[in-house]
Amino acid sequence: MHPIFSYMPNETFEVSLGKDGGTKVFNSVEELIGWMANEQQFWSWLGQQPHTNEKQTILNQFDGFVRSVNQQVNEIKSLKNQATERKAEPDLTRNFTNIGNFFKQFYENQHGFSSETPKGKFIEHLKKEQGQGVATVACGYFMQVGFNYGGYDGIRGAIAATSFDYGLKDSAMSEKIALEELRLHWQTVFQNFEKELNAESENHKQLNSDAKIQLTSQKENFDQLVSTSKENLDHLISTSKDDWRKLKTTYDAELAIRAPVLYWKSKATSHLKLSWIFAGVVVVVGGAIFWLLFLEVRRLIEPPTSLPQPELWHPEYWRLAILIASALIGVWIVRILVRLFLSNVHLQTDAKERVVMVQTYLAFLRRGKISKEDEQFILKTLFRPTATGIMKDDAVPLTALDALTKIGRG
């Protein structure tokens, strides 16, 4: 007893073709559709004229089998389309089981036979040799269909089928034809398989050759990449060590001169504030001295109101001496304040220059672009003594006696 159905991956399934046909394997639903079309072509003569009840009886059984299989095939197509939309694998087990049952029902229970079997070849030969009537009766005999075997065609068909079935009639020709068609079929299958195998073999050889070339190229590229990466890594390590050394040197140098930098920045800020303070003091004191001198001049050179002839009056010399002395003292005070203002401006500028010089020195030191001689020069410049910025001749103005004494010495 052959199995009803066997489902394997890629839509491959097996069906039974009865005692004479054995089993047949379909690799796809499309292959089943093509096979069914050939069988319909083989059994199509049953629907031709002259139309008889015997033909219709056998044709009804075959058409029922075809309709049942086609219904499952259409359902399989629909399930595959739905699965494609869902991007999932369709479950076709039930459909293939039903198809296997329909094959078993027709080829085993109803004793059907396919065009590929010796019976099929015998019926085809009998139809051509003795006509469709005799062939119809022989089909009915093989399929055990109960209808009237009387009449000339009925008797001849029954005798021919009985002789073939029990070996009384030489069935070698039919079997030979069936075997020859089967041989030609498998020869074509094996030839196509051989062509595909040779093509795949050549393709695999080419792929292997390309793979070897690619592996060789990849190995060369990999070796080159490893070599380049090693060189780059060594260079990076060397550069990093050098940068770290320079950074450490810079860090140490920065720590060493951090206090002076902070000192000079603070000094620059304080001198800026003092500059503004002395600027304001100069303006206020200068204005006040100018106003006091104006009042004093007005008071000293103004003639007394009790004089009979005020136009003949002139101020006494002691008044002029007081006025000149007051003016000299006022100018001397303003001069000292101005020099204090300029001194703070000078000290502020000097402190800013030192900060810039320190930062530049650190930048050059970190990049290693400074020689020992330049380093000594910069350090001497940075740590030079700071002048106060106050002029040396900030004493009181020269008296007439001092001036005459200097002129005499000259």
Image (spheres, rainbow, N blue to C red):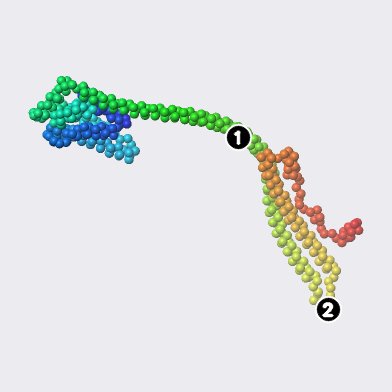
Name which quarter of the figure residue 27 lies in.
top left
Res. 198 image quadrant? top left
Query: In this view of the protein, can residue 195 be seen by the observer?
Result: yes
State the residue at coordinates (76%, 68%): 294
Q: Quadrant of the C terminus?
A: bottom right
Disc on the earlier residue, 2 or 1: 1
Classify residue 27 as left or right of residue 248: left
Q: Position of residue 330 (x, y in %)?
A: 78, 62
Answer yes or no: is residue 255 visible. Answer: no
Residue drawn at x 83%, y 71% is: 315
Which residue bears the numbered disc 1? Answer: 236
Q: Position of residue 76 (x, y in %)?
A: 27, 36
- Neighbours of disc 1 within 10 Å: few (<14), some (14-19), many (20+): few
Up the image or down, 408 lies above or below 357; here it is: below
Which corner quadrant of the image does residue 94 belong to? Answer: top left
**Secondary structure of the residue carrying numbered label 1:** helix
> Which amino acid is tagged 2?
Gln
Total numbered labels placed on residues in the image: 2
Disc 2 from disc 1: Cα separation? 103 Å
User: Split into 4 quadrants, where in the image is the N terminus?
Assistant: top left
Which residue is located at x 44 percent, y 29 percent? 206
Report the residue that reaches farthest toward the right: 408
Residue for badge 2: 309
Which residue sits at x=63%, y=37%?
243
